Amino acid sequence: MIAVGACAPPAGTRTGGPGTGAAADPAAAANAALDAGRYLAAAESFGRLLDTSEDETRRLRYAAMSALAYQDAGEFGQADHVLAAYEDRIAGEPALATAHACSLLEAGLAEHAWDIVSSVDASRLDAYPRGAHARCLGDAAWQTGRIEQAATAWVSAHRYPYPQERASAIAAATWRAVAALPEPTLESKADTADSTAAGWYALGLVARRSMLDPAELAEQLATWQTRYPAHPGAAVLESVRDRATALTTLPRKLALLLPFEGTLGAAANAVRDGFISAWYQDQSRQSRPAVQLYSTSERPLSEIVGAALGDGAEFIVGPLRKELVEELQSDAAIDSSVLALNVTDQATGARSNFYQFGLAPDAEAVQVARRAARSGERALILAPDTAWGRRLGEAYAAAWSELDGTVLDKVYYNERAESYADAMERALNIDRSAARAAALRRRLGIPLHTAARRRADIELILLAGFPDNARQIMPQLRYFGAADIPVFATSHVFSGTLDSEGDRDLNGIIFGDMPWLFGASDPATLELLQRAWGSKTRDFARLFALGIDAYRIIPYLARMRRDPTLRLPGVTGDLSMTRSGVLERKLFWLRFVDGQPRPLDTVTAATGDGR
């Protein structure tokens, strides 16, 4: 006798069908379609359940499942139609809120989507909507610049069901976020994550440490694959290899042109030392180029370039002075490749082998403005009344206009110690408040006790200044009741030397800088230079970093120009290139806490302050 039920079907499988006489369970049919990846069928099945169910709790669940399945089927219009009927219930239902956030994200409203999806309690969700929540959270975080949250969300998305036809895209999105994390964050996460997540972070570490050495990268990727078999990250390995091996032929000889004498002598020497340090560390010793140095301090540039080309140089790096870069840029007779170590104000033009790389403050100002835009639309700009300050103030204003923000005022302060209070009174309209009170006392003819009030419409401050400026400005802002206004600044606000007592007045300032200075990129090289050059490394750390990246980036320049999405980790920041040949670096974000710069992601995680 055959035992009845010995071959029972798997849970959730329909036991009947057309012509069998057994009625199908509609909910089981909907879930079976979902499990099979037939999202449109699943959405329609949940929609029918929604129409026939009288239980309100089940109706809300069916509505959410229908909307989410429509979205995974690419039918966002149908999903919006479902959501519209439950608009007043979205806030209290995590699955509905998730679907609503996904819809907003599809409509291009990333910040609004982030506000909603980040407030959802994902622990209340079943497996499928929880996966949709992770994907929506990851995408919203990435689009709004919250890199660590994006990486965490995308990594977690692999634990839950998702459309298999999107597996490659989901792996690519996960890798994009993970690859953008600084090395210390990757190390920390790799040590504490479960196996799948740890595999992603370990892959990020491999790329961070070996991307600029294709042979080493190939070896490390093979080790990674052995350690993490069948990992979803395997889908991105080919693109990682492509990025590492897409090298142009290295020049056999290159010329480094710098102003070794005169006012820029110390800066030039720091760039040179960083460049040569990277050359010594280059593991491909047989193929690395010969380097010859030329001073631009005493001879005409055309003469120096002619001498370098006559000596067999195939590639030119330098000079530093902007006017010399412009001269080199306009010389059509030069057909060798050039990596200029400054950025001009004019377009590169038709020369596809002319590249520009510098530490321009106005380029930093653009990134600072973009980061600050999360905190509001109405900005006050503070900058010193110098040529440098006015340049940075105008760069802030132009970037803020591009972001559709409102510049309430640009206040240029005098750098004399006694003038800061007056400047802050003007910036905050304290002087106008005091004038109104004085006028009122004169009009009434009686003594009045009034307290001057600052203007209330300032949502954030874009600050241009150096440490000494900021140490004067921040106490004045606190004194005049503006301590709650977030302040954003470029790297110039940090001296490069840790001074917790001297920098305590800088507490609260958010600024962007090079990851290298804070152990977030290639700390071994920084330690090596500190041993070799001591205080010189501290004083010129950013210029050492410029020299290091200038050497390491040479093999990738042509490919980066063809592919603006290509991003390589550098000590000055993650590097990409515009189609006009200008290298751009992504800043590392920090906030002063207890007088010390702390990585902003760490501070945010500790305080919950996502500004």
Image: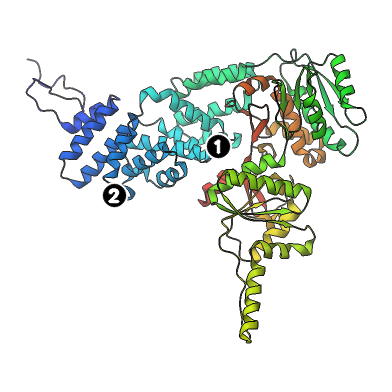
Residue 81 rendering spot, x and y as whole percentages: 28, 39
Looking at the rendered structure, which numbered label has been put on residue 498?
Answer: none
Residue 239 rendering spot, x and y as whole percentages: 53, 20
Looking at the image, can residue 511 be seen? Answer: no
Q: Residue at x 87, y 23 (%)?
A: 302
The answer to whether residue 429 is left or right of residue 154 is right
At label 2, the amino acid type is: Arg
Count all numbered tags in the image, as a single digit. 2
Which residue was labeled with disc 1? 188
Quadrant of the frame with the N terminus:
top left
Q: Residue at x 74, y 38 (%)?
A: 542
The answer to whether residue 61 is left or right of residue 395 is left
Disc 1 versus disc 2: distance between alpha carbons? 39 Å
**Dot 1: element:** helix
Q: Residue furthest bottom?
A: 446
The answer to whether residue 399 is left or right of residue 384 is left
Q: Tags 1 and 2 in contact by the CB under 8 Å rule?
A: no
Looking at the image, can residue 158 be seen? Answer: yes
Residue 333 rendering spot, x and y as whole percentages: 80, 18
**Dot 2: element:** helix
Which residue was labeled with disc 2? 89
Q: Around disc 2, counting alpha carbons within 10 Å, would you say few (fewer than 14), some (14 to 19), or many (20 or more)?
A: some
The earlier-in-sequence mark between 1 and 2 is 2
